[in-house]
Amino acid sequence: MYRSHNCGELRSSDITKEVTLSGWVQVSREFGGLTFVDLRDRYGITQLVFNMEDNEALCTQARSLGREFVIKIVGTVRERSNKNPNRPTGDIEIEVSALEILNPSKVPPFTIEEESDGGDELRMQYRYLDLRRGPLQRNIKFRSKLALETRKYLDSQDFIEVETPFLIKSTPEGARDFVVPSRMNEGQFYALPQSPQTFKQILMVGGIDKYFQIVKCFRDEDLRADRQPEFTQIDCEMSYITRDQILATFEGLTVHLFKELKGIELAPFPHMSYDEALERYGSDKPDLRFDMEFIYLNEQMQGHGFNVFDGAETVVGIVAKGIADSYSNKDMKGLTEWMQRPQIGAKGLVYVKYQGDGSIKSTVGKFYSDDVLSTIGTQIGAEKGDVLFVLSGEEEKTRKQLNELRLEMGRRLDLIKEGDFKPLWVIDFPLLEWDEVSERFHAMHHPFTSPKKEDVERMLTGDHATMKALRADAYDLVINGSEIGGGSIRIHDRELQQRNFDLLGFTKEEAQAQFGFLMDAFEYGAPPHGGIAFGFDRLAAVLNGQSSIRDFIAFPKNNQGRDMMIDAPSPIDEEQLKELSISLNIQE
Ligand code: ASP
């Protein structure tokens, strides 16, 4: 037997018991004739003690143990003289009578503690060591529980879990496909699903009615810290359903998960249209944990001789509270430069300081008298001590830039309370986006999304300008500025789906070749349907107030899409290439 107990469970009530424990050596310390070893497993850490006077051979053996050795011990639980209140097992220790080394360990390349000294790449290369650390142990366990609670809730709502295939044809979600060559079909390729979108719709035609799956999706896109080429979704679809019923069902799921996993009761989620979100926050995923709403200033600030504003489509600002006196010229210069970085690309940053002593200081004082600025201050509710920041330019771009400034000021002013969660449904997205470069429409959500009922007729018959104004029956769940999920009511008739493909620039033949199966299915009694998918990794991170999804994935990839541990992707043999009828033509 390797263990009678685990390393996290012994307490004072176990004193005098003889126990067997197995685990990893976290640290060992010598203290006079005593040797203390912290023994760790998934459940916790228990202190072992060896006494040179009692058993010299055993104590000498204990002194030879290195970090991460795997050992088994037999011993007696006793009260600890020097208790550790920070550890659940901190009242006891084990007086060891037998020690067996099950497996020695090389010195690990980084410390296996709550905080590690290893860099990201190194920890990914030795993921099995990183996984032993407390934070990852907790995250992986959390993830398992999250999946379990998701299944419980969806089961209670009559959903059926169905697996859909991985070797398929392209399902466009706006990224590139990963492709897999087929040996048996020379020169042909499968695509890995960017999502199970078309299959779940086919399941609705197949009468499954309520489907879900916790499923891997694959998207070949440029990676950021919160993106992975393969990631997991909670994917769902329902038949005979309205948008509001879908939102209610998945609000229910979210509420259930927050309650079961974090003990947090979420208030009902507000709904906000895409247009309103952009107007008020400059983002379709606004962080509602703090206010700082946009204030439009065209009326107040144009016509005063300041050319930059006068010629701008939009003049818009935000008020940052209480920093007028503490932000020096140098701070302001730093902030302006931050806004001018290519990632944001603002030309400049105008500010008006409503200083504590009642005076006003502004970068545009030449054009606006104190009286004018003071009137503006009153109109927008700026008080002594506040700063009004103003940007101007083309509407869409300016709003985006101001969104960045808003988020940055939220962080700098500590407006975001830890443990605060502000979910929101963003609804009524545009159906199509016009891309100036390719001179094409793109589906804002995906090509299977239905326009809103009142827009169907216009979509079938309208001109180019009409298409830009079409609204989709699409929605996103946003929590604390992160997009947690999105979905839509789908098109379920052939004519409308065909029209959508036309608008997206598919020829009839292309649409038929790629999605004929779906449009064919629509002709055999497809019920009205809709659905949604949540980003599972992202949800796990957000529930824990963290931004990186990597820490919630057992084996993540780095920013180049590489698995550092197994060193993939990698070249394959000549033989294998031949079998697949693939010849490489790589130019150095
Ligand atoms: N397939 C969509 C996605 O992956 C979600 C949905 O529309 O249900 O984003």
Image: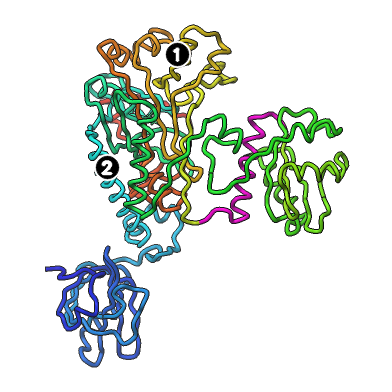
Q: CA distance from mark 1 to mark 2?
A: 34 Å
| Residue 86 is a magenta residue | no
Q: Which residue is mark 2?
A: 153
Q: How is the image coloured?
A: rainbow
Residue 478 percent across, percent down from the top left: 46, 40
Crowd around label 2: few <14 · some 14–19 · many ≥20 (10 Å)? some
Q: Nearer the viewer, residue 85 or 377?
A: 377
Q: Which residue is mark 1?
A: 456
| Magenta span: chief secondary structure | helix
Q: Nearer the viewer, residue 365 or 400?
A: 365
Mark 1 lies on a secondary structure that is helix
| Residue 395 is a magenta residue | yes
- Residue 480 in the image: above or below residue 245: below
Name the residue type under label 2.
Answer: Tyr
**Residue 161 visible, this orientation:** no
Q: Nearer the viewer, residue 380 or 464?
A: 380
Residue at horizontal 59%, vertical 46%? 291
Residue at horizontal 67%, vertical 29%? 395
Quarter of the image holding residue 235?
Answer: top left
Instruction: Report whether the residue tagged 1 is closer than 8 Å to ligand 1.
Output: no
Magenta stretch, residue numbers: 393-417
Q: Nearer the viewer, residue 436 or 403?
A: 403
From the viewer's perspective, is 541 left or right of 343?
Answer: left
N-term-proximal mark, 1 vs 2:
2
From the viewer's perspective, is 224 left or right of 214?
Answer: right
- Residue 346 in the image: above or below residue 190: below
Residue 173 percent across, percent down from the top left: 41, 27
Residue at horizontal 51%, vertical 18%? 470
**Residue 188 visible, this orientation:** yes
